[in-house]
Image (cartoon, helix red, strand yellow):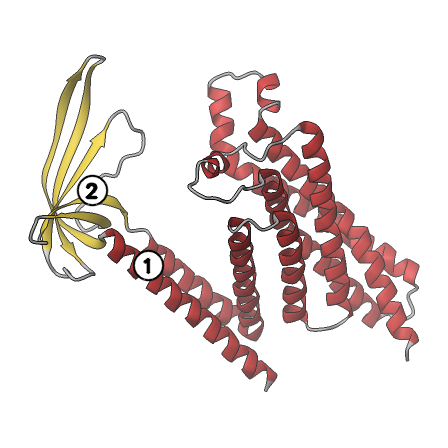
Amino acid sequence: MMKKNILRIGIMFFLILFITGCEKRANTSEEQDVFIGKILTITKDEINVIETSGGGYEQRIQEAEVELLDGPYEGEVITVINSMDQMYAYDLELFEGSEIYTFVEYDEDGNILEGFVYSYRRDKYIYILVAIFLVLMVAVGGYQGLRTLLTLGLTLTGIYYMLIGIAAGGNAILLSVVICALIAVVTMFLVTGFNRKSISAIIGTIGGVLVSGTIAMIVSDYAVLTGLGTTEAQMLVYTQSDVNLNFTSILFASILLGTLGAVMDVCMSIASAINEITEANPFMSTKDLFKSGMNIGRDVMGTMANTLILAYAGPSIFLILLFFMNNIPYFDIINMDEIATEIVRALSGTIGLVLSIPLTAYVAAILEKKNESNY
């Protein structure tokens, strides 16, 4: 009965998310006059040379016949204009058969004059990929896979409301700590149930994540990290809002979230292993269980530390290439706000992961032996 109830809750949760997302996308398109269109034919594709005081530069102009696939003008064919300028590295080239988002202009009578390219339609393929992911999780994982999807949905919900709270002027540190703790508790209990290993993993996870965030905050204070090292953070400064954002606190929140997944993985691996060892050999002492947990943790630590470092280094590969190709000195690189922030983020997260190992091993060993003493 409990499994059926969890199944129903999970299905209803994802249906609500899907319906809400579709409704929001439809409302956005209607308000902005942005519609989905399919390119039928390219009617014009030419390059014009525009002369300026700085010399001539090329501008490529495409015109296409596009069939609108949604909105009040569904089925209508309009002309869409696409301009590509050699001065910009990022341009959208049109191809027959592709689907795009196009925004339109109207005449005085409300009829469509022409359209312009807004972006490629990428969400369709993202939804297909999400569907494949959901099906595989249930097909391969069965009931456990469904519970995993439910925890994932709850995790995303928690992050969503944390962001709403920060955007409304809430304390990013307090919000991130509470949300991370809730995510850890809900995930562990839903995945493994209410038992000793889940409690051990929760304690280890919360402890490791808090250590990671605390170290990051201390180092950020001494190194004078502003939290404004990324382009996105700098754009937030100019956001039209009455809320005064604390970017150092937001940096703390991002470090907690970035560390949480890896730390949960390590802590659950150790707690689960100690539980299995105790079941197989109930006569092992607390000290021996702790040593076994530490040995397992050391093996896991080797791969997870690399995973955490690579997770932070991967998105920075373009920036690193930029440094290499422009021969920027090491002294300049290491002292950049953005680079220093990423290094602190990666190392503090890894330190939190490493310290969560003995904490989880100790708590799991104590709880397992305490449980045996009750018999």
Quadrant containing the C terminus in the rendered view = bottom right
Task: Find disc 2 in the rendering and name its residue.
Answer: 94
Residue 25: mark? 1
Q: Whole-percent x and y of residue 332?
A: 58, 18
Quadrant containing the N terminus in the rendered view = bottom right
**Residue 165 placement: quadrant:** bottom right
Q: Whole-percent x and y of residue 300?
A: 71, 51
Residue 249: mark? none
**Residue 362 placement: quadrant:** bottom right
- Up-down relation of residue 228 to residue 270 (above or below): above
Label 2, residues with CA under 10 Å away: few <14, some 14-19, many ≥20: many
The secondary element bearing badge 2 is classed as loop
Question: How many numbered marks are there?
Answer: 2
Residue 261 visible at all: no
Judging depth in this view, the residue of 249 and 324 nearest the camera is 249
Q: Whole-percent x and y of residue 326?
A: 47, 18
Q: Whole-percent x and y of residue 130?
A: 42, 60
Q: What's the residue type where badge 2 is placed?
A: Leu
Residue 129 visible at all: yes
Determine whether, in the image, residue 165 is placed left or right of residue 190.
Answer: left
Q: Which residue appears at 84% of the width and 68% of the height? A: 278
